[in-house]
Amino acid sequence: MKIKRLSIWLLVIIAFLGGIIYGISMFAIIFNGYAAKDVCSCIYLSERDQESIEKNDLNSFFVGLPTNVWDKENRTITSSFLGLATQTAVYRDGLGCALINDADFETVKNQKYKPVFPNINPDTIFWPYGDKLRDSIPANINIGKLKKAINAALNEGHTRAIVVAYDTLFMEEAYNYGFTKDTRILGWSMTKSIMSTLVGIRVKQNKLKLEGKTQINEWYNDERSKISLKNLLQMSSGLEWEENYSKICDATIMLFEESNTAKYAIASEVSYPPDSVWYYSSGTSNIISEILKRSSDSYEDYISFPREELFNKIGMRSMLLETDASGTFVGSSYSFGTPRDWARYGLLYANKGYWGNEQILPDDWVKFTSTPAKKSGGGYGAQFWLNGGKNPELPSCPDNIFFADGFNGQRVYIIPDYKLVIVRMGLSKKGEFNYDKFVRSILDAFE
């Protein structure tokens, strides 16, 4: 009898421990994936050393747990915690890093893209069309106030870079230790705004329409056929989705467990009729990326489209959109560019979609971008955040400001009243940086 009871207790203990190990493994897939992807991208795209990345970027508890092994020959980072749920990210020329997950390693490793750049020397061309800075300061700028505001922000909330660009006439910048004007920095969800811009260009080319069925033919025989591209851009699709990074959810599964991020998001079921609710969804932005792919003439057209039709035209030489293992841009999250290039991106919108004399975006696209989605409470447009609604990010600043917003405090603020763009990049947890005080102090330097 005692032996029988002991056996039962042993089985219970084994089952209990097995459940714990299983639970840890499920969560380890996520934080191992985060670590492998982040270390890989920051080494190969930001050209930072592994020790600095692990010390600073992986400084929260769970993502700091994995051991990250760099295989320089295969250009991979493999991350694991206690040998559980090992994750590997591989770097590909022109495409950045991707988690392998269930994809074939050799296939993903051999993916590549060779971008073609304009044959110019940006150091000989004045900002923003090049990198040569003017010596003159416009009369309406109090340069002392501006420098003071920038320096104060640089010492707050783990700020890494600040760029202030006034029309095409003036640019001031500052960088913290370890970062320079040439350092690419991850934009996180500012990538969503770039997806919107690319859609705008496709609309101008008459290859996409905001209304009617999208290119997602998987939806044609059910209620999802009613979802328009406009609904997706405005985060109003009504698709079932959970975006909560404190737990395992749709967003974390998509980014860190799936080799095809768009495919995972496309499979989402309907929860509400289109345009009846607003809900922030990274899955939506990856569906938009897939729509861009399906509106392209070929895969080569899709992969070169951002470079040829946007980045080259406005001088964003450093910008790179990373693809997942399937070769699809991760439109929700993964874009790397220098702070100067992020400022150029903002200037495109400050100048109503024009770059010099060339019209990049359709008429009224900037207006559409900065118009509140019906159910957003005034705070969200078309993959851009708005300084409106009940709880604006910048309550002491003009309410027509709109901005790209990324995790850990990445921002590109477009301020139409001032013809101004403010870029702030950092590694800030919630509450560590006062964005309203920062932007207000910059605006106060313009008289």
Image (cartoon, rainbow, N blue to C red):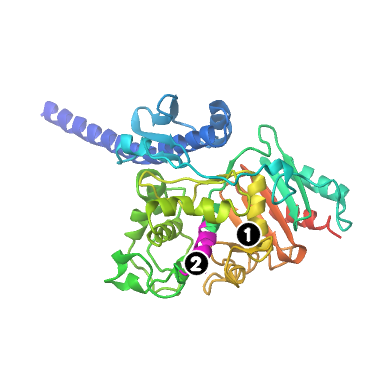
Which SS class for mark 1? strand
202 magenta-colored? yes
The segment highlighted magenta reads 195-206
Q: Position of residue 405 (x, y in %)?
A: 59, 54
Taking 369 as reference, is 334 above or below it? above
Answer yes or no: is residue 238 visible.
yes
Q: Residues within 10 Å of mark 1 (few under 14, many from 20)?
A: many
Q: Quadrant of the C terminus?
A: bottom right
Q: Which mark is residue 379?
A: none
Residue at horizontal 66 percent and vertical 66 percent from the top: 352
Measure the C-alpha gap from mark 2 to mark 1.
25 Å
Q: Position of residue 295 (x, y in %)?
A: 40, 62
Taking 211 as reference, is 430 above or below it? above
Is residue 267 rendered to the left or right of residue 368?
Answer: left
Q: Which residue position is annotated with label 1?
A: 403
Q: Which residue position is annotated with label 2?
A: 205
